[in-house]
Amino acid sequence: MIYLDHNATTPVDPAVAERMAWFLREHFGNPSSIYPIGRKVKELMNEARERVAGSLGVDRGEIFFTGSGTESDNFAIFGTFDAAPEKNEFVTSAIEHPAVIEAAKALEKRGVKVTYLPVDEYGTVGLDDLRSALTPKTGLVSVMHANNEIGTIQPIVEIVRIAHERDVPVHTDAVQSLGKIDVDARKLGVDFLTVSAHKIYGPKGIGALYIRRGANICPFVRGGRQERGLRAGTENTAGIVGFGEAVRVLEEKGRKERFRVEKLAETLKKGVEERIPSVRFNGHPENRVKSTLNFAFPGIEAEAILLSLATKEIYVSTGSACSEESEEVSHVLQAIGLKPEIARSSIRMSLGRSNTEEDIAVVLRELPEIIKKLRAITAFHPEG
């Protein structure tokens, strides 16, 4: 099997699985309990919190565990507007993850005006558009750090500077950034930042939200006093411990592993462009997460490519796993100006730790033949 869909999810690292199995065998206490078996679980949770905080350059007390990256996005958005009901405008980008887009639609139903910032052909938000969108009624700006479909990295530092000049808080979804590029919430200057364990070889069902100390936000889930009263409900203790271990492994493997994967991705990108005629690369040529590759193969439906590759046990996707079952054209590819027929011919290949040079060689042997055969069926002529 050749797995090229690491942006959708990653396999759990063996060290993470072992740590979680040990925890589940040895520690069952409720961390809200004051007796020793509960306090021990609390201690292990805080160790994990410390690791996640350290990976983002923030304090332990600024990390709040949630059930997913999606929940963290919703927490930041709804929590901010609930805390400042006098604000009724929200600014985001046209290429956000569905977790933000759907939250924006829900805000619109509540009477909040939502501005979807356009992007250029590479998927980059225009700073002048941001300036024009901000008003005294703007309650929050939410722009993702790196796009999940095309990998483009947004100018978050500049976005924060512009927003903060108007006293507007900023949230960024960094789910696709952690482990792939440097993520330092302090240096970015954001008020809220989202991450998720299953994108960094940790378990599913556990995310985290960085909340800058002093930021104005209301509880998202109400009930007990877990997560300092902002996210009630007995914590997913095993998931939290797994998240912490995933971050530890990430730190251990460090930049060396990241650069190895980026080199493989560059070899794959160059090989596809050299071996297949009339291929279009979607995304920024340089300012992007290098392990994310998005190609359009005009004349072929992406689903046909996916199914053909799957017969070879090569697994890729058409974009966000959270909207994969939808028949709609990718909103991200539409936003960068692709015609629907080109967008529908686009696939995403996202590389990770499990990939090898042999994997890339196999893909570069199989994919050109698949594209050639599928184009022959559709009578596609690359030269017009």
Image (tube, rainbow, N blue to C red):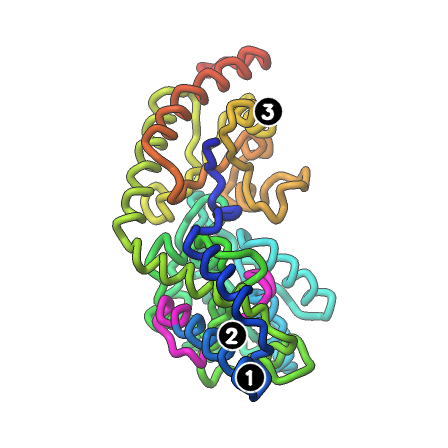
Marks 1 and 2, Cα distance to the nearest angstrom? 8 Å
Q: Which amino acid does label 1 sit on?
A: Arg
Percent x, y for residue 152? Answer: 41, 49
Viewer can see residue 195: no
Q: Are marks 1 and 2 in contact (CB under 8 Å)?
A: yes
Q: Is residue 260 above or below residue 201?
A: above
Q: Is residue 232 above or below residue 56?
A: below
Q: Identify which residue is drawn at 36% across, 57% down.
A: 250
Taking depth in this image into account, of 128 and 296 the one nearest to the observer is 296
- Which of the numbered marks, if any, corresponds to residue 64? 2
Q: Which residue lies furthest to the right in this view?
A: 109
Front label number (1 vs 3): 1
Q: What residue type is labelled 3?
A: Ala
Viewer can see residue 26: yes
Q: Do the residues labelled 3 and 2 touch (CB within 8 Å)?
A: no
Mark 3 or mark 2: name the one nearer the start of the chain: 2
What span is colored magenta in the figure? 51-71
Callout 3: helix, strand or loop? helix
Q: Residue furthest front?
A: 26
